[in-house]
Image (cartoon, helix red, strand yellow):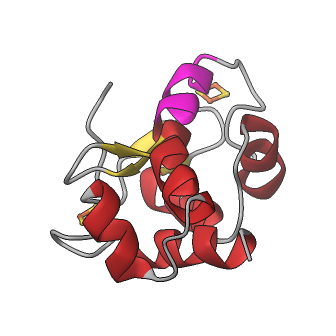
Amino acid sequence: MTLYKGTDLVCYCLKVDYATIRKAMKDGARTVDDIQEMTKAGTGCGRCLSQVEAILASACSCKDVSMDAIVMAAKSGAKDVREVAEKTGAGSCCGRCQPLIQNVLDSEK
Ligand code: FES
Ligand code: FES
């Protein structure tokens, strides 16, 4: 997958950047439909949809931890960001993904 940062454009049709997609994930987007609704990314030619899917699947880019792994850690009893980091490694490097991890924890309560 392309390694995106900050203001890198993901969806050229609708001019949606990586940071906007990550923010939507922090705000609860978990599916491509959610991302399309919240950001409009992917609602034009559709060429960016595979990239949107890849961004959605990856929650912690430093440690290459998937969203699924974080959801599983929350379901299997991790109560806070530190415990998710102990189980998966996610959130233990730059910390940028910690608000997303917290959001997953909150939505699993
Ligand atoms: S590049 Fe995203 S819809 Fe066309
Ligand atoms: S993106 Fe998760 S610790 Fe850096």
Residue 79 image offset from top left, x and y in percent: 52, 80
The N terminus appears in which quarter of the rendering? top left
| Position in image of residue 91 (x %, y %) | 29, 69
Q: Residue at 56% of width from left, 34% of height from top?
A: 52
**Is residue 69 magenta-colored?**
no
Location of residue 61 with respect to 95 vertically, above or below = above
What secondary structure characterizes most of the magenta part? Answer: helix
Residue at 51%, 48% (x, y): give it.
67
Residue at the limit of the structure toward the front, as seen here: 77
Quarter of the view holding residue 97: bottom left
Highlighted range, magenta: 47-54
Judged left or right of residue 41, residue 67 is left
Image spot of residue 13 (x, y percent): 63, 32
Residues 11 and 70: in front is 70
Q: Is residue 92 left or right of residue 27?
A: left
Image quarter where the C terminus lies is bottom right
Seen in the picture, residue 10 relative to 104 is either above or below; the reply is: above
What residue is at 54 percent from the left and 43 percent from the top?
68
User: Does residue 51 belong to the magenta stretch?
Assistant: yes
Q: Is residue 97 visible?
A: no
Is 81 left, or right, of 103 in this rendering? left
Viewer-proximal residue among 24 and 42: 24
Furthest residue toward left: 93
Question: Quick check: can you spot residue 19?
Answer: yes
Residue pictured at 57% horizontal, 54% vertical? 71
Ligand 1 resides in the quarter of the picture at: top right
Q: Compared with residue 80, is residue 49 higher up or lower down, i.e. above or below?
A: above
